Image (spheres, rainbow, N blue to C red):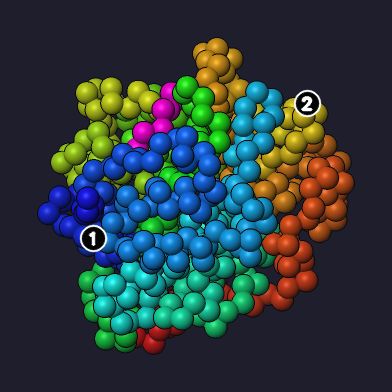
Amino acid sequence: MKIMYHSTRDKNIKATASEAILKGIAPDGGLYVPEQIPKLKTGFEALAKMDYAHVAYEVMKLFFTDFTEEELMNCIKGAYNSEKFDTDDITKLVEADGAYFLELFHGRTIAFKDMALSILPYLMTTAARKCGASEEIVILTATSGDTGKAALAGFADVPGTSIVVFYPKHGVSRVQEKQMVTQRGKNVNVIGIEGNFDDAQSAVKAMFTDENLAKRMKAGGYRFSSANSINIGRLIPQVAYYVYAYSRLMPKQINFVVPTGNFGNILAAYYAFKMGVPVNKLICASNRNKVLTDFFETGVYDKNREFYLTSSPSMDILISSNLERLIYEIAGDETASLMSDLKNKGKYEITSEMKDKLDLFKGGYAEDDEMSKAIADLYRKENYIIDTHTAVAAAVYNKYREETKDDTCTVIASTASPYKFTRAVLNSIDEAYDKKDDFELFEELNKLSGVDIPDAIKDIIDAKVLHTKVCAKDGLEAEVVKIYKI
Ligand SMILES: *Cc1c(COP(=O)(O)O)cnc(C)c1O
């Protein structure tokens, strides 16, 4: 069966999977959604015997129906291999304190973004070939920290592509920034902005839908595409690890707890549920920027509130773009008007009928002190060290379990290596660590956890800074115009 995609805001704006991957975002500013979410055809007993790449194939072939088996398998093999991941299983399940941690950070940039961004360049260049697109693909990305590096690593020196990454100059960790500004590659650009992630994301989205700019790019031989999590070429590969995790454990039912920012990772879990994974609850964990917790509780999405910088910077987000796809599931044709409320008033409210359809979800949040306690407790109890984002999820899950006594088998998405947020992680265990410098802390974490310092960290310790540009939050387009001389 062939699956077509259409915009969340207009069913008549259609695209094949290849076109949707290539465009990133629909021309009306909506997100591409599959006209229906396909059911898994392969049983879990069979999936249980497959390795990660083959499970990924069984999931992705149902969504990317215009790719041939050979094309899709080539993309998968290029991405999920021992050169790009430091474990043969690609992901690991670690049991600790009555839950399973699904470690999604064994890729090159030690955050879960690698799970999708290692395959996206393959999907995109294959899609371009299939669509007969001859322009250079320009990846424009706004990042809250981890996407940027993973996208840079994925696209660096890929023929026919180039990439521009914008990150909040004062809103990412030192390791995150160092990872990005030391990126090598002839086709990479990294620019800090004097603003937060939402400023960067809004400006990038505006460029994507600016017809005049697209015309000038086309005249120069370029076309924009997006590596942000709104691209289905990122979303669909993420569905695979939920199916994979379930197939390794196969309990009667399963809960997934997901530390959430832009709502891409948890949406992938929801798609896995729609495909047939027997999910009991999807627990959406937020930090102090708890716009989603409030939304699931009240049905009102309201971004008009103070923005906080926390120790889980990749979740410091007030506009969770991928939520629009879930809204589409419950609101259908009303989606466009809700999104226009979001744009004009900064808020929207769903009806109670729509809210009833969100039963599967449970929102929860944890403040930084609760997050730190989750790290320290888990370390003391199990000698297992998790990063700050994962710890937000663990803290939210601990509260949920206490409140509900739900003893369903639970998988917590572990989205980054603790090495990526070493200072905040070690300070949670003992504040005395704060006196040491960042690079000493890697040694300390190594001693404490027994986990080797990942190559991603070793590589940046002495790497040279190659990117120093900073622009104002209304200056992003001017930077793009300068880079491409259009
Ligand atoms: C991006 C990111 C998140 C948030 O994921 P979304 O898909 O944006 O909800 C959580 N943790 C880490 C470490 C991340 O890099």
Provide the residue designation for mark 2: 381
Amino acid type, label 2: Lys
Please report whichever mark, 1 or 2, sits nearer to the chain's N-terminal start.
Answer: 1
Q: Residue at x 28, y 78 (%)?
A: 133
Give the left or right position of residue 362, taking residue 104 as reference: left
Quarter occupied by residue 122: bottom left
> Which range is magenta?
275-281
Quarter occupied by residue 146: bottom right
Q: Quadrant of the C terminus?
A: bottom left
Marks 1, 2: nearer the viewer: 1
Label 2: element kind = helix
Q: Is residue 438 magenta?
A: no
State whether residue 275 appears in this view: yes
Give the left or right position of residue 211, taking residue 95 as reference: left
Q: Measuring from the top left, give residue 461's x and y in whole percent.
A: 77, 66
Q: Nearer the viewer, residue 244 or 43?
A: 43
Q: Residues within 10 Å of mark 2 (few under 14, many from 20)?
A: few
Quarter occupied by residue 82: bottom right
Q: Residues within 10 Å of mark 1 (few under 14, many from 20)?
A: many
Q: Measuring from the top left, give residue 479's x and y in whole percent.
A: 44, 76
Q: Nearer the viewer, residue 79 or 485?
A: 79
Amino acid type, label 1: Thr
Label 1: element kind = loop
The image shows residue 210, relative to residue 49, as above or below, that is: below
Provide the residue designation for mark 1: 16
Q: Measuring from the top left, give residue 469's x and y in whole percent.
A: 56, 75
Give the left or right position of residue 344, taking residue 477 as reference: left
